[in-house]
Image (cartoon, coloured by chain):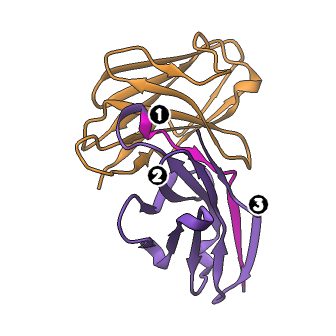
Chain colours: A purple, B orange
Amino acid sequence: AQSVTQLGSHVSVSEGALVLLRCNYSSSVPPYLFWYVQYPNQGLQLLLKYTTGATLVKGINGFEAEFKKSETSFHLTKPSAHMSDAAEYFCAVTQGRTGTASKLTFGTGTRLQVML
Amino acid sequence: GAVVSQHPSRVICKSGTSVKIECRSLDFQATTMFWYRQFPKQSLMLMATSNEGSKATYEQGVEKDKFLINHASLTLSTLTVTSAHPEDSSFYICSARVESSYNSPLHFGNGTRLTVT
C-alpha cells in the first residue's frame, strides 16, 4: 500500500521568498516520488522525480526536492518565489515503474499563492 | 518530450446523453494509460487503468458500465461516460508513460472539463 500526505492545503509566500511545500509518504517498498504542478483548467506538468540515486533532485522552474528516507519525506523547495509559481502542487508516489504498478497515488494538493 | 493529447478540452452535454473523451500518446506507445477524475479543489482520484488489447481495471467504487474504457491501440484510449448525470460533472484527466524508457514518469493530458446540464 502507498499513500501521500501533503501538509497545508494552502501556502502563501511573498514574491522572492522561499517556497517550502511539504510531502510525506508511506510505502511498503522503496518508492518513486514525484511533484506535479497544475495550473487552472489544465492537466499536470511534471516538476521533478526521484527514483534512485541522488537524493537531492532538481527540477524545472528552479524547484528541487530532497528524498529523506529516515523522515519519509519529499519536500519541495524553491529559493525565490515568482508570481508565475502560483498554482496547485501535487506530490505523488508509486511503487513500480511498469504497467499497472506505475499508477500514481496523489496527495491532496497544496495551493501556492504568491503575493507582491 | 512525450506528449499526451486529450480531446475535447471542454464539453457540455444534457443529462442522459453519452460523452466520449479521447486520450492519445502523440510520440510514443503506451500499453497502459490511466484515467483520473478531479473534483473542484480536490486531488486526482484514479478511476481505472486502461490496458491495450484487454479489459480495463477499475478502482473500487467506479462503475465500469458507466465509465466505459476502450484501449484499442498503443496510442489511443477512450473514456465514455454513459447516460451522464449532473453528478458526473468533473475534470477528467488521462495519463500515460513511455514504456520503453526506464523510470519514465507519467505524462498527463490537459484534461477534459465535463459539464452535464
Q: Where does the magenta region start and end?
A: A101-115
Classed neighbour count for the residue bearing mark 3: other residues with Cα under 10 Å, few (<14), some (14–19), many (≥20): some
Circles 2 and 1: CB atoms closer than 8 Å: no
Q: Amino acid at mark 1?
A: Phe
Where residue B35 appears, x then y in whole percent? Answer: 51, 32
Gap between marks 2 and 3, in whole Å? Answer: 26 Å
Classed neighbour count for the residue bearing mark 1: other residues with Cα under 10 Å, few (<14), some (14–19), many (≥20): many
**Residue under the image location 63 percent in, 64 percent down:** A87
Instruction: Please give the residue where the numbered disc 1 appears in the rendered image.
Output: B34
Circles 1 and 3: CB atoms closer than 8 Å: no
Where residue B79 appears, x then y in whole percent? Answer: 50, 23
- Foreground residue, A2 or B90? A2
In the image, residue A28 lies in the stretch drawn in magenta: no
Quadrant including the C terminus of chain A: bottom right
Give the secondary structure at mark 1. Answer: strand
In the image, residue A103 lies in the stretch drawn in magenta: yes
Query: Residue A9's mark?
Result: 3
